[in-house]
Structures are given as C-alpha cells and as structure tokens.
Amino acid sequence: MAKPLPSTARRRKIGRVLRQIREDAGLTLNAAGRSMERSGSSLSLIEKGIQQLRLRDLKHILDVYDVAPDTRAALMTLAEQQQQLGWWEEFKDTISPAARDYASLESNATHLDAYEMGFIPGLLQTEDYARVVMHAGQVENNPAQAERFVVYRMARQQILDRTRTPRLHVVIDEAALRRKRGRRQVMQEQLVKLIEQSRRDDISLQVLPFDVESDPGDVTSFQILDIGRPAVLSTVLIDHLTGSWFMEEESIIAAYRASFRRLSAAALGELDSQKLVQRIVSDL
C-alpha cells in the first residue's frame, strides 16, 4: 500500500475553504460527494487536506459548488503552487516534510513578519553564523548533517535575490544581537550584514532594546507568512526543539498579528535600530 503524502498548508487551506462552502450550502459530505461523483469519505479527506487534489478535480468541485470568481482564483493559485517542485526537494535527506512545505510557502510569500528572541533570523544570517548555530544545535554531534542544514539555510535566502521579493519586517530582541555565536569576527560580519540588509527597501529591521518601557507581552519567537495581496493563505510558524508548529486558524493568526504590532510599536525605529546594531559592532 502506497504511503500517503504528508499534509501541506496549501492543501489544508483549500480543504478548509471547501468545507466552509459545503456547510454554507447546507450539504452533507455524502450529498456533496454524490453531486461530484465521489464518495463522502474521499471528500472528507480532501477537506482535511490529507488527499492530493489534481487541478482538474479541484476545477470540477468548484464548478459543482458554483464558487465565486475571487475564491476560485485563490484556490486554483494555491493548487497550482502545490504542484511546483523547487530547490527544497534536494533536501529530503535533511529536513522534515513540514520544513520543506514551509520552504515552498516561503518561495511564494509576499509578506513575512518575524520576531526573534535569541538568534539572527535565518533569512539574514551569514554562512559562518549559521554554521555556528547549526553545529551547536546538533545534539548527536553529526558535523556532516549540520553542514547540510547550513547549505539549506543559505538556499532559503535566494528569495531575497529575486526580482519580486517578499516584504520582510523583522523585530529582533537586543539579546539576540549581543549573544556571542562563535568568534568575534563571525559576530562582526553577521551584524554588519544585518545593517546592510536593513537598508534595503524591502526589508524593515527593528530592535527591541533591553530598556523598553512598555511590555509587549510574554511571547516566543515566531513568523507570520502571507501569500498574495490580499493574502490567499496565511500561517504562523513557531520552531521548537524537535520541529515546527503551523498555526492556521484565523483567530490565532489575528492574535499573533496583534502581538507583532505591539512588539513593533515597543521596538526602536529603523534608523535608531541601525545605530544600536552599529554600536554593538563597535563594542565587540
């Protein structure tokens, strides 16, 4: 028996929208399935984002439901993106299916908000800084595996070199800038790169200083990713010791957006943030 494909954020989004359309129409799974000549159990798997959905099958479902043009276009865009194979497929031996899915989402992102407490965000890391981080995080002491993670992290940064780059807004805790990772030269080069990247029109960098007066709330590092303007898919990513969590409920995403706004409001402005990073470089 063939092993089922892992669920992806795009499939889950398509499934949630299709379920909402069906429920709004007052149809049961079996009734809706009969109208499109498939079983209710098959439709249930599609709505849960478990079953792979071919483009022609999605078009048929949308035709049966008589879906509005805007919604149809959004779902077809996600389905077409889902068919794309990218550079991340080369890292099947290194990263989890969830990590490959996020790399795929990142490749189509139009906007990224990130709050980082302990590290320079991966999209802005130098290779040497990433190497220190990856080797330190290898609890099994596997240098070769750590090097593969470094190559993967550097490959992710290619989205910042495209003609149409995502809008990146980063809030970094001052602790992440002062935490020494590797030799003095590694930190110097990393912080200099951070300053250089922050001068780009498509990147906004703010630092949350130690002496901030307002409390932005007790939150951990997180990223908010949007695809499309307006967004056809949004997700929150939180990394943990053994993997990542995807947060996809609208109420949860809204809560993290509100948290990011509070963090941004409490942080230094972009120019003052650049000056603080420069002072930290001078102190090294």
Image (tube, rainbow, N blue to C red):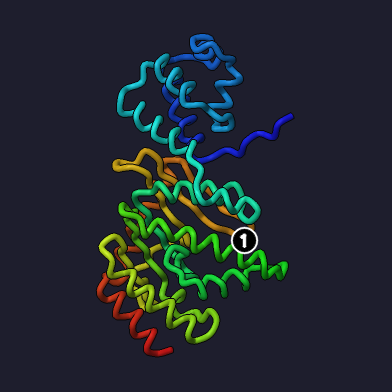
Location of the N terminus by quadrant is top right
**Amino acid found under the numbered disc labelled 1:** Leu
From the top left corner, tell me how far across and down residue 265 is, in percent.
29, 64
- 131 sits to left or right of 115: right
Quadrant in which residue 152 is drawn: bottom right
Quickly name the residue at label 1.
Answer: 241
Asked whether residue 253 appears in the rendered view, the answer is yes
Q: Nearer the viewer, residue 6 or 113?
A: 6
Residue 31 vs 43, above or below: the answer is: above
**Viewer can see residue 259:** no
Judge left or right: residue 89 versus residue 274.
right
In front of the other: 276 or 137: 137
Near mark 1 (Cα within 10 A), the count class, few <14, some 14-19 or many ≥20, is few
Question: Relative to 206, is 58 above or below?
Answer: above
Which residue corresponds to the image point at 36% horizontal and 26% vertical from the top-left?
A: 72
Residue 193's x, y, as percent?
38, 74
